[in-house]
Image (cartoon, grey):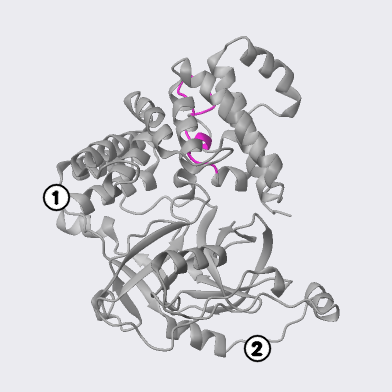
């Protein structure tokens, strides 16, 4: 199963698994809650305390149950995971009703994602707002992004900027550099030149940030099957990794290995032992998109905050060349974030026209100009993927693949391109994309 049995569930847990209540001494020192969470042998004492009405114990028990739910979900036990999420929600609600701010966020998050219950954004919002009012930065960030995009509420850019500014300052204060920069970039995209951007970046500099990202040893990104047995993603997602795990939409985990690398174009093909275990491949477009063409991507941005479910982002081809007129890439207006790297850029016929690769280096631009740019991102052209595939010998057969063929069990076919609605293609792509966890 997973090569990361302890860290993967926590990367996929929203901010419940990040900074805990400041009153909990482990929280400030540990990036992952499992370092502080009681183990299974502590349940009796923890439950007794929770049943006696201790809000902190109720919250901790909810987190323990949520972590276990993720473990069960990744193991394919969906029914057990739902029951654990439902029980976690019960304890989060009890703590939330006692005014516990992190429990309020956790309950709001589970409701907003439909974990253990039907998705109910309307029911989630009051709890998220209560947590935000008590300065839980993860709640401020999530509400800010929801307000900016009009998710579950009327779009309100002033409110979005305010929430994101508060979250960015808090993230910077606690050394969560990447999330602080995400807030600054989102604010700049909504209101270019807003003074809070400068305030956030100056606070980061006072904390020792030198203009580069503080990437963790564990990296997540997006990939997608491009041919039988092969998943394509960006090389920078897995560079230097000693283990690579693919997380499929049905909860399956597959170990993967690097099969072929295109160093110049930041592309890599990952191979799995059983090619038939992968979902259907996505078709490469036969021709390039036109300027202004509608495109979208589905991926896993900021999984630690936004969760493990794939997210849709839409936009257009805004430039036929990339940065400094690079002919290998398109400029796109599709909003992307850390975790989208390697995802498919898809047209409205369901064909992949590119691979999401990068955002403009917002930090460098800020240091040189004093302003952060808006949505200006880049995708590698699909022809580069086609060229990479042409250089790779096919027909690898592992034991699992041989057994499938022996018993007449076919592999999932490649999806066929067809004109259809955005919703239709987004759901098709959602079933094929995989989260990549590299360590």
Disc 2 vs disc 1: Cβ atoms closer than 8 Å?
no
Residue picked out by circle 2: 393
Left or right of 402? Residue 81 is left
The magenta stretch is 13-27
**Is residue 174 at least partly visible in the picture?**
no
User: Which mark is on residue 193?
Assistant: 1
Q: Looking at the image, which residue is at 58% across and 59% down? A: 438
**Is residue 210 at least partly visible in the picture?**
yes
In this view, the residue in front, 151 or 37, is 151
> Outermost residue toward the front?
420
Give the tally of numbered discs.
2
Give how far across and how far down residue 152 sits, in percent.
35, 42
Which quadrant: the N terminus?
A: bottom right
In this view, the residue in front, 205 or 163, is 163
Which quadrant: the C terminus?
A: bottom right
Secondary structure state at the residue bearing disc 1: loop
Q: Main secondary structure of the magenta part?
A: loop
Give how far across and how far down residue 4 sits, in percent.
66, 50
The local crowd at label 2, few if under 14, some if 14 to 19, many if 20 or more residues have their Cα within 10 Å, is: few
Res 38 → quadrant: top right
Left or right of 162? Residue 100 is right
């Amino acid at each position: 199963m997973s090569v990361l049995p302890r860290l993967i569930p926590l990367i996929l847990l929203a901010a419940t698994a990040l900074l805990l209540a400041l009153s909990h001494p482990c929280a400030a020192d540990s990036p992952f809650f499992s370092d502080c969470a009681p183990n299974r042998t502590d349940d009796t004492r923890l439950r007794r305390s929770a049943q006696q009405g201790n809000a902190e114990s109720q919250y901790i028990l909810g987190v323990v149950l949520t972590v276990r739910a993720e473990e069960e979900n990744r193991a394919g036990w969906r029914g057990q995971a739902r029951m654990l999420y439902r029980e976690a929600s019960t304890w989060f609600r009890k703590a939330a009703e006692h005014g516990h701010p992190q429990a309020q966020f956790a309950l709001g998050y589970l409701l907003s994602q439909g974990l253990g219950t039907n998705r109910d954004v309307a029911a989630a919002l009051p709890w998220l707002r209560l947590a935000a009012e008590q300065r839980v930065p993860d709640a401020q960030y999530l509400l800010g992004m929801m307000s900016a995009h009009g998710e579950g509420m009327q779009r309100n850019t002033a409110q979005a900027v305010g929430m994101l500014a508060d979250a960015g300052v808090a993230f910077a204060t606690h050394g969560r550099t990447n999330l602080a920069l995400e807030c600054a970039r989102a604010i700049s995209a909504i209101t270019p030149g807003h003074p809070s951007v400068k305030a956030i970046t100056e606070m980061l500099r006072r904390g020792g940030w030198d203009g580069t990202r503080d990437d963790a040893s564990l990296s997540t990104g997006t990939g997608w099957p491009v041919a039988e047995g092969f998943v394509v993603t960006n090389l920078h997602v897995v560079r230097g990794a000693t283990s690579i795990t693919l997380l499929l939409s049905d909860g399956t985990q597959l170990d993967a290995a690097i099969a072929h690398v295109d160093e110049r174009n930041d592309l890599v093909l990952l191979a799995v032992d059983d090619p038939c275990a992968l979902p259907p491949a996505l078709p490469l477009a036969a021709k390039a998109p036109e300027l202004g063409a509608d495109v979208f991507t589905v991926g896993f941005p900021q999984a630690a905050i936004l969760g493990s479910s794939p997210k849709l982002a839409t936009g257009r081809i805004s430039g036929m060349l990339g940065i400094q007129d690079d002919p290998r890439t398109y400029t796109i207006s599709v909003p992307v974030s850390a975790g989208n790297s390697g995802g498919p850029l898809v047209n409205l016929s369901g064909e992949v026209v590119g691979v999401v690769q990068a955002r403009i280096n917002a930090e460098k631009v800020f240091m040189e100009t004093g302003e952060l740019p808006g949505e200006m991102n880049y995708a590698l052209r699909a022809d580069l993927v086609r060229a990479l595939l042409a250089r790779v010998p096919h027909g690898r057969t592992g034991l699992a693949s041989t057994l499938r063929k022996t018993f007449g069990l076919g592999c999932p076919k490649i999806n066929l391109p067809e004109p259809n609605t955005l919703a239709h293609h987004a759901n098709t792509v959602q079933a094929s994309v995989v989260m990549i966890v590299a360590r």
